[in-house]
Amino acid sequence: MQNPNESPVNPMPPVVVALFFLIVGIEALFSLGAAGILGGAQALGWRIGALQDYGFSGEIFQWMWANNRWPSEHVMRFVTYGLVHGSFIHALFVSVMLLAMGKFVGQVLSQLATLVLFVAGLVAGAVAHGAMHGLLGWGSPWLVGGFPGVYALIGGFTYLIWVRLVATGNSGARAFGLIGALMAIRLVFGLLFGSDGTWLADLVGFGIGFGLSVLLVPGGLARLRQRLRRD
């Protein structure tokens, strides 16, 4: 019998709520400042200043790599870039996808594991972007926004769906439909409007999210071993 005091809707994991309000709060400051509601005339440059101070730069990555120097004010960019966005629409899409993917993943993983997944996606995405631009000269020099972290959650979501499908005797390939669709959309937009090269950060974020989920999901490693032995 269902507990009458139990909510019919599963609550949003607190760590996902915290990330959501952090991103939305920062974006609200930028938007209100740009509208002249907060901060006066100097607020018009808040977003640009934050992108320069906290965004991830492929050129700075190249300098750190070449000189083997890793000052904290630049190392923090591996994570902080995920909290600042280029526009309101950019932040809106990241926030919506964060809630959708974070709710599903956060109900299976612990709060800490969900946060680790998101942060690991940001770091891995930044490294991939830095290598692509800073070392190979491809794509945009700057990476901003939380999509690589969100794609890591999509990787966790995909792993959970894959496990569920395999456990019921279905093809696990169906679990990759979401990432396939998202990458196809990115490809179409890239062909129509040009690509800034940030797709690699998203894809690597997805990969690290899928791989880490094997370790972070309770019983995930043992389940994978059983699957490999069976095959």
Image: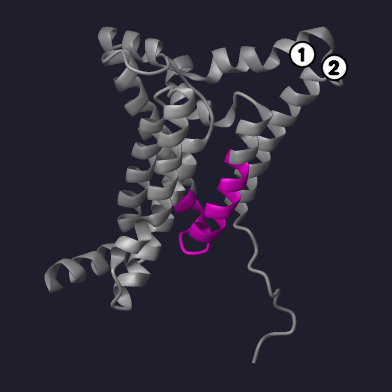
Q: Position of residue 107 (x, y in %)?
A: 52, 63
| Mark number displayed over residue 25 | none
Residue count near mark 1 (Cα–Cα under 10 Å), binned few <14, some 14–19, many ≥20 = many
Residue drawn at x 39%, y 24% as measured from the top left: 197
Q: Position of residue 133 (x, y in %)?
A: 34, 17
Q: How is the image coloured?
A: one colour
User: Per the image, is 105 magenta?
Assistant: yes
Residue drawn at x 42%, y 21% as measured from the top left: 75
User: Per the image, is 77 magenta?
Assistant: no
Residue at numbered disc 2: 36
Q: In the image, is residue 40 above or below residue 128?
A: above
Q: In the image, is residue 229 above or below residue 204?
A: below
Mark 2 to mark 1 CA distance (whole Å):
7 Å
Residue bounds of the magenta highlight: 94-114
Give the left or right position of residue 115, taking residue 96 as reference: left
Q: Nearer the viewer, residue 164 or 21?
A: 164
Give the left or right position of residue 90, taking residue 199 as reference: right
- Give the overall secondary structure of the magenta segment: helix
**Residue farthest bottom in this picture:** 1
Label 1, secondary structure: give it. helix
Q: Nearer the viewer, residue 227 or 18?
A: 227
- Disc 2 to disc 1: CB gap under 8 Å: yes
> Which amino acid type is shown beneath numbered disc 1?
Ala
Quick one: quadrant of the C terminus? bottom left
Residue drawn at x 26%, y 9% as measured from the top left: 66
Of the two numbered discs 2 and 1 on the same chain, state the one appearing first in sequence: 2
| Mark number displayed over residue 43 | 1
Q: Position of residue 176 (x, y in %)?
A: 35, 56
Q: Indicate the quadrant where residue 100 lies.
A: bottom right
Give the left or right position of residue 89, taking residue 102 as reference: right
Q: In the image, is residue 120 above or below residue 109?
A: above
